[in-house]
Image (tube, rainbow, N blue to C red):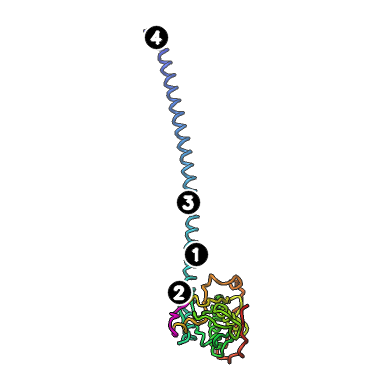
C-alpha cells in the first residue's frame, strides 16, 4: 500500500478521534450542566422544604398554645359552673327550692307557694327573700344571662283571677314578668341578663294526677344559661358587675301584680 494512503488513513483516524473526543467532551459538558441544574433545583427544594417546615412548626406551636388556652378556658368555665352551683345550693336549696344542672344549664325551681298567693302575681315577702338570694349569687357571675319561666299545674282557671288572668299560660307569664321586674327594680340586676317566659301547664316535672304532683308543677324556674347564651352587651369587657346584694336586707314592700296583656 502506498505511503500516501497510510498518511490519509492516519489523518482520517485522527479527525475521527478528535470528533469523538469533542462529542464526549460535549456530552460530559451537558451532563455537568444537567447535574448542576439538578443540584440547584435540589437546593431550592431543600430551602423551600426548610421554610415550609419552619412555617409548619410555627403554626403547630400556635395551635398548641391555642389548645392550651382553650383547655384553660374550659377548666375555668367548669370551675365557675361548679362554684355557681355550690353557691346556689348553699344559699337556696330547701324543701321548696330544688337545684339541678344539665348540659351547662343550672336550673333553680322555686315552688309557687313560696312566691305567690293563688291566682296572683304579687310576690309574697318570703318569695322576695328567695329572689334576693338568687340575685345575690348571680351578682358574682355578671357575665351570665338567665331565664325566669313561670309554670302551673293543669287545673284550668274557671273564672277570671283577681289579677285578670283567664288561663294558666297567661298566669305563668305574668308571674315570670313579676319576678323579673322585682329582680331589676329591687335587686339591681342588669335587665340585659333577663328573659321572662311562661310555660303554663305544658312543662310539668311531676304527675298532675296527685295534689303533691300539682304542687311541684306550680313553680318559677330560674335557668342560668351557659356563657355562650349571654347577650352581646354582657360580652363586652367593660360591662360593670351587678351591684352587690345584701341578702339580709329587709324585703321591700310587696309590688303590685303585673298582668300580661
Q: Residue furthest top?
A: 2
First reached walking from the N terminus: tag 2 or tag 4: 4
Q: Which residue is mark 2?
A: 102
Image quarter for residue 186? Answer: bottom right
Q: Residue at x 47, y 74 (%)?
A: 78
Q: Are marks 3 and 2 in contact (CB under 8 Å)?
A: no
In this picture, is 70 found above or below 124? above
First reached walking from the N terminus: tag 1 or tag 4: 4
- What separation in Å lies between label 1 and label 2 (alpha carbons)? 27 Å
Q: Is residue 124 magenta?
A: no
- Residue 107 is situated, as x and y percent measured from the top left of the image, at 49, 78
First reached walking from the N terminus: tag 1 or tag 3: 3
Q: Which residues are magenta?
A: 204-212
- What separation in Å lies between label 1 and label 3 (alpha carbons)? 24 Å
Considering depth in this image, is 82 or 207 the residue closer to the camera? Answer: 207
- Which of discs 3 and 4 lies nearer the camera? The answer is 3
Q: Residue at x 44, y 29 (%)?
A: 27
Q: Which residue is mark 4?
A: 3
Q: Residue at x 48, y 38 (%)?
A: 37
First reached walking from the N terminus: tag 1 or tag 2: 1
Q: Which residue is mark 3?
A: 50
Q: Which residue is mark 1?
A: 66
Amino acid at each position: 500500500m502506498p505511503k500516501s494512503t497510510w498518511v490519509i488513513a492516519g489523518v482520517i483516524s485522527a479527525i475521527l478521534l478528535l470528533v469523538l473526543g469533542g462529542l464526549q467532551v460535549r456530552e460530559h459538558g451537558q451532563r455537568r450542566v444537567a447535574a448542576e441544574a439538578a443540584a440547584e433545583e435540589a437546593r431550592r427544594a431543600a430551602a423551600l422544604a426548610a421554610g415550609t417546615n419552619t412555617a409548619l412548626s410555627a403554626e403547630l406551636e400556635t395551635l398548641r398554645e391555642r389548645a392550651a388556652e382553650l383547655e384553660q378556658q374550659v377548666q375555668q368555665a367548669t370551675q365557675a359552673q361548679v362554684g355557681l352551683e355550690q353557691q346556689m345550693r348553699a344559699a337556696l336549696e330547701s324543701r321548696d327550692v330544688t337545684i339541678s344542672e344539665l348540659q351547662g344549664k343550672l336550673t333553680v325551681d322555686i315552688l309557687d307557694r313560696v312566691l305567690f298567693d293563688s291566682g296572683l302575681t304579687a310576690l309574697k315577702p318570703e318569695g322576695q327573700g328567695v329572689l334576693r338570694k338568687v340575685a345575690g349569687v348571680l351578682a358574682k357571675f355578671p357575665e351570665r344571662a338567665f331565664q325566669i319561666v313561670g309554670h302551673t299545674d293543669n287545673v284550668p282557671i274557671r273564672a277570671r283571677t283577681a289579677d285578670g288572668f283567664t288561663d294558666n299560660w297567661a298566669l305563668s307569664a305574668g308571674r315570670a314578668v313579676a319576678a323579673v321586674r322585682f329582680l331589676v327594680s329591687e335587686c339591681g340586676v342588669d335587665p340585659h341578663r333577663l328573659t321572662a317566659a311562661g310555660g303554663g301547664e305544658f312543662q310539668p316535672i311531676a304527675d298532675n294526677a296527685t295534689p303533691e304532683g300539682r304542687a311541684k308543677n306550680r313553680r318559677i324556674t330560674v335557668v342560668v344559661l351557659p356563657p355562650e347564651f349571654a347577650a352581646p352587651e354582657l360580652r363586652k369587657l367593660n360591662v360593670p358587675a351587678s351591684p352587690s346584694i345584701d341578702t339580709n336586707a329587709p324585703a321591700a314592700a310587696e309590688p303590685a301584680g303585673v298582668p300580661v296583656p
